[in-house]
Image (spheres, helix red, strand yellow):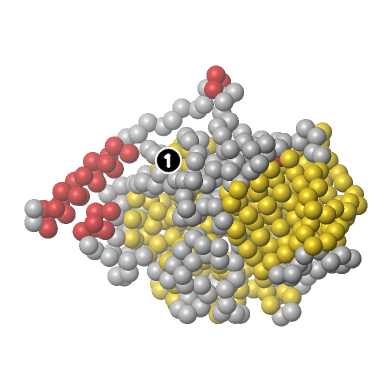
């Protein structure tokens, strides 16, 4: 078969597949008869977002509008492994309880619908809506598999779509693509935002191992402004899913711009991870404060995270959510019915210490509304050495929140931390090495790991603790999120025990550990 005929055949196949996707019937709501088993599969998260079924990866199009947090996400509705990408859709009024909505964007003749973002065009600069009914506008990467297979490198272009009914239905712009590929193989993941100081729209997108920045007055026509990233930060893999936003430094009026960039591979503990930069941005060029590597999360399982746009000024938070997985093993983790979940939404803050700016992140305050008053345990003043089991009563460890306060100033402990375990003698360890000045998580003997040689192991993160060490831990059916000292260090870890963890131990090596206080809370499920 000659090359032109082969390309034409591939194109016809793609059209047939797309037509079948477009005609798929919308899924009916879950019936009352299935509620008893709804979201009850082994390893199914109980207070994290996950799709009802099939494959999910990157969060997309995060935007707040008229009392609702919109969450779109990379979705393949026909399998539990990655395939032709759609945009799944859910909404929430509290960032915790989510309502599933029909698929927002389907593939079409221009390609699959890869990652992107969404905004509310409040002044109708696009002309898609009106002053009384401003449009919600999404921008996304068209990934054309036919062009890719033909050998072209111009198979990723940017398209837009808009909604006039609060995101329930979407119309794709008739003149797509609005930003054509200039001849770069990886040209994707656009994140657009209104730049109030520059009085224009800006767009940041991933371009192989760096980012490009654009500007626009109407969301339809984009002008190249600058490039950032060559020789700066981590470059162990391709850059993906960038974000750019202003954030005030805590304790003052100084404002800096923060750039998030995910990288795969090249993370600090192998595989996927997200780095960040702080600096200045004038609507044209981003100038970093430093050129070294900084990570928003040192765990192996927080990737492609971005932040919500259009959060009300009265709220003022910068809220982040990430994909809770790693491309090293995402397609083979031992879940059935669905694959993948998202991190808990987190509030990002910016701090200055020793002339260095750094990001902190902590669970959104709304999490407190999930605490079960009757499932609360408090502990005060406890010394321990070796391993000491802590009674937790009827508390379900696999659906809980734990807060620890350790004192380090009055002992010579080499390391200390906690162990989660079960009757199978499976153990997940979170520890702090005083000698090495680093945190670590150990899932080598924490349950099912045979699905990937990349999964089991120890993850480490450098950290210099003070005289008091605080650990805030969220444990769900297949994940553990660690926030140290109000989010100065974060580690997110997937774990698949063959039996639920049922006991908790404190451990101390090389001396006596000192627990100042602790509190454990059972959490309500959100489904």
Position of residue 197 in the picture relative to residue 349 (left or right): left
Position of residue 452 in the picture relative to residue 3 (left or right): right
* Residue that badge 1 annotates: 80
Q: Residues within 10 Å of mark 1 (few under 14, many from 20)?
A: many
Give the quarter of the image for residue 521: top right
Q: Position of residue 400 (x, y in %)?
A: 72, 42
Q: Position of residue 179 (x, y in %)?
A: 36, 64
The answer to which of 232 and 104 lies nearer the viewer is 232
Q: Residue at x 55, y 19 (%)?
A: 33
The answer to which of 10 and 396 lies nearer the viewer is 396
Q: Residue at x 71, y 37 (%)?
A: 502
Q: Which residue is the extreme one toward the left? A: 2
Q: Residue at x 56, y 34 (%)?
A: 42
Q: Check disc 1 and report its element: helix, strand or loop.
A: loop
**Against 478, is 285 above or below?**
below
Q: Is residue 165 visible?
A: no
Q: Position of residue 443 (x, y in %)?
A: 60, 51
């Amino acid at each position: 078969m000659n090359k032109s005929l082969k390309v034409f055949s591939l194109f016809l196949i793609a059209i047939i597949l797309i037509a079948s996707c477009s005609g798929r019937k919308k899924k009916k709501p879950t019936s009352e008869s299935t509620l008893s088993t709804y979201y009850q599969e082994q390893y199914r998260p109980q207070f994290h977002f996950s799709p009802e079924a099939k494959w999910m990866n990157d969060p997309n199009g995060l935007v707040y509008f008229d009392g609702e947090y919109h969450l779109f996400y990379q979705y393949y509705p026909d399998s539990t492994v990655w395939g032709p990408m759609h945009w799944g859709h859910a909404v929430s009024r509290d960032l915790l309880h989510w309502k599933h909505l029909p698929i927002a964007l389907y593939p079409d003749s221009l390609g699959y619908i890869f990652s992107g973002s969404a905004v509310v065009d409040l002044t109708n600069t696009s002309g898609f809506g009106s002053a009384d009914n401003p449009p919600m506008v999404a921008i996304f990467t068209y990934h054309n598999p036919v062009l890719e297979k033909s050998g072209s490198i111009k198979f990723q272009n940017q398209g837009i779509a808009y909604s006039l009914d609060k995101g329930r239905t979407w119309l794709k712009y008739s003149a797509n693509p609005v930003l054509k590929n200039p001849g770069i193989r990886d040209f994707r993941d656009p994140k657009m935002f209104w730049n109030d100081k520059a009085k224009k729209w800006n767009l940041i997108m991933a371009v192989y191992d760096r980012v490009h920045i654009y500007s626009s007055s109407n969301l339809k026509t984009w002008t190249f402004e600058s490039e950032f990233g060559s020789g700066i930060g981590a470059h162990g893999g391709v850059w993906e899913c960038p974000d750019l936003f202003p954030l005030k430094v805590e304790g003052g009026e100084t404002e800096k711009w923060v750039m998030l960039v995910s990288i795969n591979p090249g993370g600090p503990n192998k595989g996927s991870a997200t780095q960040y930069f702080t600096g200045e941005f004038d609507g044209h060029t981003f100038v970093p404060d430093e050129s070294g590597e900084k990570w928003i999360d040192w765990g192996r399982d927080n990737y492609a995270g971005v932040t919500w746009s259009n959060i009300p000024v009265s709220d003022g938070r910068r809220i982040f959510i990430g994909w809770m997985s790693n491309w090293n093993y995402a397609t083979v983790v031992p879940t059935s019915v669905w694959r993948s979940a998202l991190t808990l939404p987190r509030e990002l803050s910016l701090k200055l210490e020793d002339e260095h700016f750094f990001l902190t992140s902590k669970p959104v305050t709304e999490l407190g509304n999930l605490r079960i008053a009757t499932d609360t345990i408090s502990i005060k003043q406890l010394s321990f050495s070796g391993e000491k089991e802590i009674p937790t009563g009827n508390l379900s460890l696999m659906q809980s929140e734990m807060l620890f306060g350790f004192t380090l100033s009055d002992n010579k402990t080499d390391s200390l931390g906690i162990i989660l375990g079960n009757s199978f003698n499976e153990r997940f360890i979170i520890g702090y090495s005083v000698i090495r000045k680093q945190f670590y998580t150990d899932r080598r003997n924490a349950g099912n790991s045979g699905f990937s040689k990349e999964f089991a192991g120890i993850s480490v993160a450098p950290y210099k603790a003070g005289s008091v060490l605080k650990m805030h831990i969220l444990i769900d059916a297949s994940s553990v999120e660690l926030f140290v000292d109000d989010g100065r260090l974060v580690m997110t870890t997937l774990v698949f025990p063959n039996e639920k963890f049922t006991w908790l131990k404190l451990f101390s090596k090389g001396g006596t550990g000192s627990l100042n206080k602790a509190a454990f809370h059972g959490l309500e499920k959100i489904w």
